[in-house]
Image: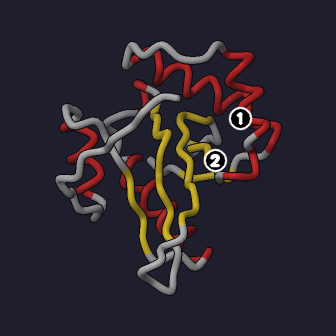
Amino acid sequence: MTAKIKIAAREDIPRVADFLLAMQDEIQEVGLERESLVKNLGDNFGNVTWFLFLDENDVPFGTKYAEKHNAYWSDKFRYYLGGMYIAPAFRGKGYYRQIMDQVEEWAKKQGAGELFAMTAAENERSAKALQSTGLLGYDYKNHMKRI
C-alpha cells in the first residue's frame, strides 16, 4: 500500500476540518464547531501548509500541517509539524512512515534545516511513531497560558 501527500488547496479546507474534528472526538477534547473551524482555517490558510494524505486510490485519509519557524541559531529555518491525524481504518498499514518521509523531502526542497513536533507526555504511541522517523525526543516541558 502506498500513501502520498497532497498540499491542501483552499477548497480542501472542509476536508481538513473534518479530520481535525475526528481527532478532537477521539481525544475527547472540546474545541470549535465545524463552521468556526472552517472559517479559522480559511482565515489562516497562508500561515501554514496543510497536507492531505491520500491512499493509492487518491482517497483522503488524514492530515498534518507544517508551520515555518525561523531558527536564529542556524542559517536555515525549521518546520513545526502538527495537526497529525490518520483515520482509524488506515492505521497500522505503514502509511505513517511514508507520509513523514514525503513531508521531510518537501521540507528539504523548501530549504528547511530541521523538523520538530510535540506530543502529549502521556501519548507514548505518538512519541514512538515520531522517534521511528528520526525525530529525537527531548524532555522539554511546554508552558501555555490562555489569554
Residue at screen point 74% across, 16% down: 35
Return the x and y of residue 114 as percentages of the image width and height: 42, 71
Which amino acid lies under the numbered mark 2 shown in the image of this protein? Trp
Tell me the tag on residue 50: 2
> How many residues crowd around disc 2 within 10 Å: few (fewer than 14), some, or many (20 or more)?
many
Mark 2 vs mark 1, foreground winner is 1
Q: Position of residue 146 (x, y in %)?
A: 48, 28
Residue 13 falls in image quadrant: top right
Q: Nearer the viewer, residue 75 or 107?
A: 75
Q: Local crowd at mark 1 within 10 Å, few (<14), some, or many (≥20)?
A: some
Judge left or right: residue 124 versus residue 20: left
Horizontal side of 94 relative to 105 (left or right) equals left
Q: Tag on residue 78?
A: none
Residue on which disc 1 sits: 41
Question: Residue at position x 24%, y 46% from top?
Answer: 141
**Residue ID at (54%, 70%):** 70
Tag 1: amino acid: Leu
- Whether pointer 2 and pointer 1 mark residues with C-beta atoms closer than 8 Å, the reply is yes
Q: Is residue 64 above or below residue 31?
A: below
Residue 12 placement: quadrant: top right
Mark 2 or 1, nearer chain start: 1
Residue at image x 42%, y 16%? 29
Name the residue at the right extreme: 11
User: Image quadrant of residue 28?
Assistant: top left
Most distant residue in the front direction: 147
Q: Position of residue 132 (x, y in %)?
A: 24, 56
Q: Secondary structure at mark 2?
A: strand
Q: CA distance from mark 2 to mark 1?
A: 10 Å
Viewer-proximal residue among 105 and 73: 73
